[in-house]
Amino acid sequence: MLASLGRVHLRRPRSYRMANSPGGVLPRLAAAWRALTATAAPAAPSPPTGAATPSVAADAAAGGTVGVKRLNHVAVAVPDLAAATAFYRDVLGAAVSAPAAQAAHGVTTVFVGLGNTQLELLSPLGAESPIANFLARRPGGGIHHVCVEVGDLPAAVAVLRDRGVRMLAEEIKVGAHGKGVMFLHPADCGGVLLELEQA
Ligand SMILES: C[C@@H](C(=O)O)C(=O)SCCNC(=O)CCNC(=O)[C@H](O)C(C)(C)COP(=O)(O)OP(=O)(O)OC[C@H]1O[C@@H](n2cnc3c(N)ncnc32)[C@H](O)[C@@H]1OP(=O)(O)O
């Protein structure tokens, strides 16, 4: 109806009335928009791209971050180093290093090249090897630790100590790559034995 009692009523098209009826598409779109805008979280900042933290030492002083960088290696404790080396070299076709005794760490290591990272095969060396208990509990071997690089290891250790993360050595030691390393207690790192290595 276009007019009634002297007043002009403009009637909307039937398609609009259907869309705007209860349960129609317009009220549903409006409800969806209200729900979206009420719950939408602010956009998360982009993840770091791997660039070094400008000053980890400054961060440490400010209670900041460690500035963790790339994965260096995943270590696998093995009961038979020769057999494990042969498996990675001859069966999987990976390049493997010669075994190297790491007397200061109580292990013998073989590195397995994987292109984007490496595996470190670990075998006990000496009676006091820190992997002896691990292998006693898992005679077949298993993933022992994860090693990530940091730009400034002493500063990273300071940050972590400040945050109550337990170090597994008093001082930074020289690791398998001739660089400083520090192990962090697995109970403070989500059950993972974490090794930090100077990049
Ligand atoms: C050459 C160098 C390099 O890469 O440069 C290396 O690789 S040297 C690689 C070898 N060196 C290291 O691993 C040095 C750091 N490791 C350590 O200080 C030790 O091995 C600990 C990780 C503290 C474990 O000491 P220990 O065997 O005497 O104690 P434990 O057997 O009673 O274990 C204490 C608690 O830690 C847990 N735990 C032990 N080893 C673990 C591991 N590899 N990953 C995750 N959790 C582990 C146990 O389940 C237990 O948890 P619950 O209390 O919940 O039962």
Image (tube, grey):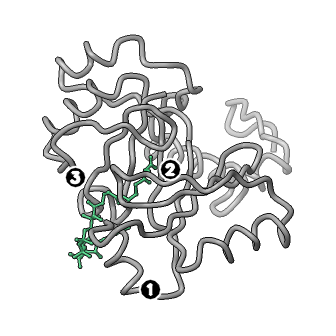
Q: Nearer the viewer, residue 6 or 69?
A: 69
Q: Type of residue at label 3?
A: Leu
Image location (x, y in percent) of residue 20: 70, 51
Q: Is mark 1 within 8 Å of ligand 1?
A: no
Which of the 4 image quadrants contains residue 174?
A: top left
Tag 2: amino acid: Ala
Q: Earlier in the sequence, mark 3 or mark 2?
A: 2
Mark 3 surroundings: few (<14), some (14-19) or many (≥20) residues within 10 A: some
> Which numbered marker is on residue 138?
1
Q: Secondary structure at mark 3?
A: loop
Secondary element type, mark 1: loop
Label 1 Cα crowd, 10 Å radius (few <14 / some 14-19 / many 20+):
few
Q: Is residue 45 above or below residue 109?
A: above
Question: What residue would you read off at disc 2?
Answer: 35
Q: Is residue 168 visible?
A: yes
Q: What type is the residue that disc 1 sits on? A: Arg
Q: Residue at x 70, y 67 (%)?
A: 85
Q: Label 3, on which residue? A: 168
Is the residue under label 2 in contact with that under label 3 (CB below 8 Å)? no
Query: Of the residues under marks 3 and 1, which one precedes in the sequence?
Result: 1
Spot occupied by residue 83 in the image (x, y as percentages of width and height): 68, 77
Give the Cα separation between the discs numbered 1 and 2.
51 Å
The verdict on label 3 being within 8 Å of ligand 1 is yes
Q: Nearer the viewer, residue 2 or 125?
A: 125
User: For this rendering, which residue is in front, 79 or 140?
Assistant: 79
Callout 3–callout 1 Cβ contact below 8 Å? no
The x, y position of residue 186, in whole percent, is: 30, 61
SS of the residue at dot 2? Answer: helix
Image height of 100 relative to 59, above or below: below
For the image, the number of numbered tags is 3
Mark 3 or 2: the one toward you: 3
Quadrant of residue 23 in the image? Answer: bottom right
